[in-house]
Image (cartoon, helix red, strand yellow):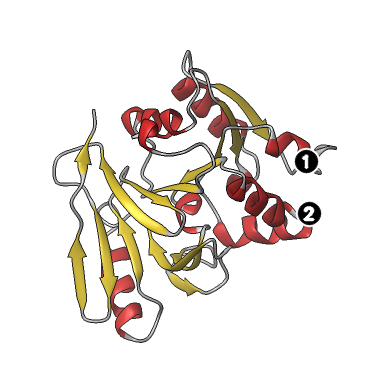
Amino acid sequence: MGNLIGMAAQQIVAMGGGGTPDAVLAEVFALAGRERPRVLYVGTTSADDPRNALLMYEHARGKADVTPLKFFPWPPAGLRKLTLAQDVIFVGGGSTANMLAIWRVHGFDRILREAWEQGIVLCGSSAGMICWFEASVTDSFGPQLAAMNDGLGFLPGSACPHYDDEELRRPFYRDAVDGGFPAGYAADSGVGLHFVGTELVEVISPREGATGYRVERGVEIPLPARSVS
């Protein structure tokens, strides 16, 4: 997959949450086009919980060089320079709304767009899936799901993670789209949706039966997926 994409391509791999399978993460690393990609791990959604950064170190051991980005108590000096020196930017799961607010206060949303336009691979799981879209289904505002129209907007339409591992996600998303919420994409746990520019070019699945979906008013279309293990 990585050999088919030019280094300057604008790429996003949006993952459905429920953990990040090593096989899918390996596909992301391959997109960087270098043997040991430089990976910026962004854990803002979980208030920079160091345990999540440690998990990324474990996933990347021997495969990539990981640098954690912390916004608490404040972001590092040279935030833009640090970000644009990476090959991959991985965003973890947690509170999407809180994360976006913090990013915007510090101008990180603008830096991410610059990174994307320069060909740095953007990716993430759960909140790190949906933040790239215009709209999404989130539990950022409480235990009940909510439809949020406040994403970064790099990708058009909406997104919903956890499609097969949280039972309320699928009916909520379908009802929201039927009611006028922007159409978009859903992903089962661990599944990666690979976009080049704003076009979905591939669905990457870590297990049999898991895939992505195009969800429009009155219809849900399962998408063909390439299995990895």
The answer to whether 49 appears left or right of 17 in the picture is right
Q: Secondary structure at mark 2?
A: loop
Task: Kindly report the distance in space between the C-alpha atoms of the residues bearing marks 2 and 1.
Answer: 9 Å
Nearest the viewer among 21 and 155 is: 155
The answer to whether 56 appears left or right of 184 in the picture is right
- Whether pointer 2 and pointer 1 mark residues with C-beta atoms closer than 8 Å, the reply is yes
Residue 120 sits in which quadrant? top right
Nearest the viewer among 110 and 136 is: 110
In which quadrant will I find the C terminus?
A: top left
The circle drawn on residue 106 is 2
The circle drawn on residue 79 is 1
Percent position of residue 223, x then y: 20, 56
Q: Amino acid at mark 1?
A: Leu
Is any atom of residue 91 visible in this view? Answer: no
Q: Amino acid at mark 2?
A: His
Percent position of residue 151, x then y: 56, 65
Which tag, 2 or 1, sits closer to the chain's start?
A: 1
In the displayed structure, would residue 183 be above or below residue 105? Answer: below
Specify few, some or many for label 2: CA neighbours under 10 Å numbering under 14, 14-19, or 20 or more.
some
Percent position of residue 183, x then y: 35, 74
In the displayed structure, would residue 25 be above or below residue 143? Answer: above
